[in-house]
Amino acid sequence: MALHACDTATDDALVQGIVANAGLILAAPCCHHELHQQIHTVAPFKPVLQHGILKKRMADILTDAFRALMLRIMGYKTDVIEFISTEHTDRNLMIRAVKRTKTGDSHFLQEYEELKAFWGVTPYIEKLLREKGCWPE
């Protein structure tokens, strides 16, 4: 479990859970600086990405989408949910992952690769899994 783990600390916690083959992983991400630095203007999104705050929010969404996809690839049933009202914090997403008996379907990896290619980014969670020799082939 990771609560408001800043930037790549969420990825560290998720990978630790994956490597340990945890039955349940819960993470409430906080800051998303790492992917924000990699995102460059993608043609249809230029009107959005030219505004700093919108680019930041897009990076937040993409980062958590990549994390959820990676958990699915690694065999987890994964949801991204709102766990507390925005009255208390605007950082109110939780990634909830429950281990299934089989590994993820190959179409999740294809979706991940397509999303990565479209945005021209490499999420930190992928770097960590590759370093640990856990990257699905």
Image (tube, rainbow, N blue to C red):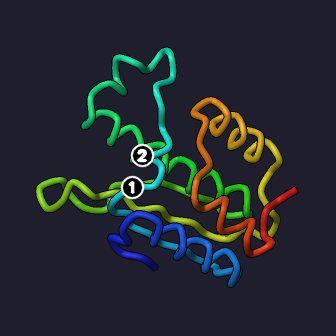
Query: Dividing the picture into quarters, in which one does residue 47 lie?
Result: top left
The reply to whether dot 2 and dot 1 touch (C-beta < 8 Å) is yes
Element under disc 2? helix
User: Residue 27: horizontal and vertical position, in percent?
Assistant: 44, 69
User: Residue 26: horizontal and vertical position, in percent?
Assistant: 47, 72
Q: What residue lies at 58% left-to-right and 53% top-to-bottom?
A: 123
Residue 49 falls left or right of residue 16: left
Does residue 94 sit above or below 13 in this rendering?
A: above
Q: What residue lies at 64% left-to-right and 81% top-to-bottom?
A: 22
Q: Amino acid at mark 1?
A: His
User: Residue 36: horizontal and vertical position, in percent?
Assistant: 42, 45
Q: Which residue is mark 1?
A: 32
Residue 36 falls left or right of residue 90: right
User: Residue 96: horizontal and vertical position, in percent?
Assistant: 50, 65
Residue, far bottom: 20
Query: Dividing the picture into quarters, in which one does residue 18 lie?
Result: bottom right
Element under disc 1? loop
Camera-side residue: 81 or 62? 62
